[in-house]
Image: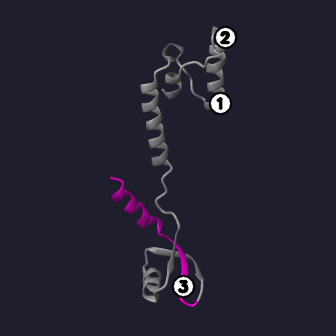
Amino acid sequence: MKLECEGYSARAQMDEQKWGYEMEVYNREYISLDPSKISKHPGKRSLAKLMLNSFWRKFGQQNNKDKTIIYNAPKEFFELVMNIVNIIKYVRLINEQLVSSTYCQHDDFAEVMALICNT
């Protein structure tokens, strides 16, 4: 839809050039364009682009990314370590007062949270 609403480029004036553009899109993107629907339509193009970007963000969303936190209170660090939901990946002593930890959550918990947060 987005490609059809962009219209042909200025250099595609003849039927052979238009057909070449359609074949180029098909070879590159595996999308068959309907020549009868190809015309400039900025409003539809903007809507199609918005929809594509929204789908891309949603499908690319990762619910269980690693998190890195710097602690200066032992109590907070031990709460993280003792929580059975967390998987501790790295712990690094920065200095005498600071500890850095990288962790993620068990996949089962992350899936449940994704269902709760994304409904």
Q: Position of residue 84 (x, y in %)?
A: 43, 78
Q: Residue at x 54, y 85 (%)?
A: 98
Q: Which residues are magenta?
A: 96-119
Q: CA distance from mark 1 to mark 2?
A: 18 Å
User: In the rendered structure, which disc, 2 or 3, sits on the residue that comes first in sequence?
Assistant: 2
At label 3, the amino acid type is Leu
Residue tagged 3: 98
Q: In screen coordinates, is 91 left or right of 52?
A: right
Determine whether 92 is above or below 64 in the image. below
Q: Mark 3 and mark 1 in contact (Cβ < 8 Å)?
A: no
Secondary structure of residue under mark 2: helix
Considering depth in this image, is 75 or 9 the residue closer to the camera? 9
Residue tagged 1: 28
Residue tagged 2: 16
User: Label 1 neighbourhood size at 10 Å, few (<14), some (14-19), many (20+)?
Assistant: few
At label 1, the amino acid type is Arg
User: Label 2 neighbourhood size at 10 Å, few (<14), some (14-19), many (20+)?
Assistant: few
At label 2, the amino acid type is Glu
In this picture the colour scheme is one colour
Q: CA distance from mark 2 to mark 3?
A: 68 Å
Considering depth in this image, is 55 or 70 the residue closer to the camera? 70
Q: CA distance from mark 1 to mark 3?
A: 51 Å
Determine whether 41 is above or below 94 in the image. above
Secondary structure of residue under mark 1: helix
Determine whether 21 is above or below 96 in the image. above
Query: Disc 1 or disc 2, which is closer to the eye?
Result: 2
User: Label 3 neighbourhood size at 10 Å, few (<14), some (14-19), many (20+)?
Assistant: few
